[in-house]
Image: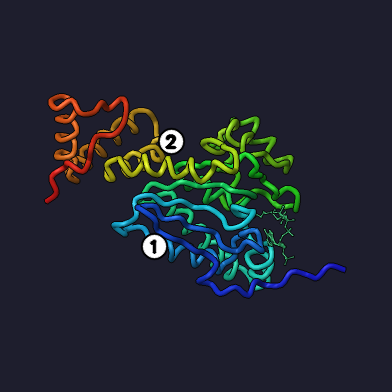
Amino acid sequence: MAMPSQPDPRPEEETVKYEVIDGVAWVYFNRPDKRNCQSPKLNRQMGRVLNELEFRDDVQVLVLTGEGSAWSAGMDLLEYFRMNEAGGIGAVRKAQREAYSWWERLRWYEKATIGMINGWCFGGAYGPLFACDIAIASDDAQFGLSEINWAILPGGGASKVAAELMPYRKAMYHAMMGENLTGQQAAEQGLVTESVPADKLKARVQEIADNLKKKDTHALRATKWAMRRVMEMTYDNAEDYLIRTQEALNDFGGWETRKEATKQFLDEKTFKPGLGAFDKTKVAKD
Ligand code: COA
């Protein structure tokens, strides 16, 4: 008979690893032998790592990816579900909070975020998937709402993520059937931004990160938050919210930045907004 799974002895601080290279924080789910499923230890550590990186001046873009063959195989059925359920409602709620809080943090992160989906992506991994502003998958990644296959519903926001991102008929089929989608299918159905061959994945993500680094940081943050907020607003509310947010951005040093960008286009003719970002290094620093 197969050996029953045991709790992972990996120390909490090793469940996530990261390196900062040239303005990009590469953050890894780091339980490859457990397909990077999310245990309470990993969830607590991810919260710490996101916290540590969010306001660092040397980080402009955060990439979330997985070590080994998985991005994340969802929640840990042993350490997140079974062990906490044995501990009662208090343990369950604590574990939920530890997971949901870092996903929420990531949804509203100060820096631009890219999910680099290198492999398995199941159920509870849809929370962080949705939280990433841009999601680039490997063609051979596998996406699944596998919950139905083990007799639960896609909780932890996963149903909402599918309903939000995918065409309704596709989302319903995806949730009910428990069949996996490849990276390419996930891109066709709106679950990720795009899908590329595995050997091009890192280069494509690097290219996007390099492009994002050229944008004005404050405008980028206001833009990504606005895109998330307006999804739940009426047209009139969105129109008003966008006016207010732009005005707040102006007070955040935005006037100077815009003046410089406009000058580069209209007067110096050194760039065209339709073809790329202005040179932000020329903005006077106070
Ligand atoms: N929870 C707990 N343990 C998990 C896990 C999860 N979500 N996903 C993988 N693991 C563990 C396995 O139990 C195994 O542990 P062991 O070495 O102690 O036996 C180890 O990770 C490797 O997994 P294995 O199934 O042997 O790898 P695989 O490459 O053959 O298959 C998957 C990969 C992802 C298809 C398979 O592990 C799987 O179906 N995982 C569950 C996915 C899921 O339904 N997640 C939804 C949760 S909301």
Label 2 sits on what residue type? Met
Quadrant assignment, res 187: top right
> Residue 24 in the image: x percent, y percent?
39, 52
**Ligand 1 closer than 8 Å to the CB at disc 2?**
no
Label 1 sits on what residue type? Asn
Q: Nearer the viewer, residue 71 or 153?
A: 71
Point 37% across, 43% down: residue: 210
> Which element is circle 1 on?
helix
Q: Name the residue that disc number 2 marks.
A: 231
Q: Name the residue that disc number 1 marks.
A: 51
Point 53% across, 60% down: residue: 99
> Residue 206 in the image: x percent, y percent?
44, 45
Q: Which label's residue is closer to the chain start, 2 or 1?
A: 1
> Residue 240 in the image: x percent, y percent?
28, 32
Circle 1: is it few (<14), some (14-19), or many (20+) Cα within 10 Å? some
Assess whether mark 1 and mark 2 are in contact (beta carbons under 8 angstroms).
Answer: no
Kindly tell me whether residue 143 is visible in this rendering. no
Q: Quadrant of ligand 1?
A: bottom right
> Residue 14 in the image: x percent, y percent?
53, 70
Establish if 138 lies above or below 76. Answer: above
> Which element is circle 2 on?
loop
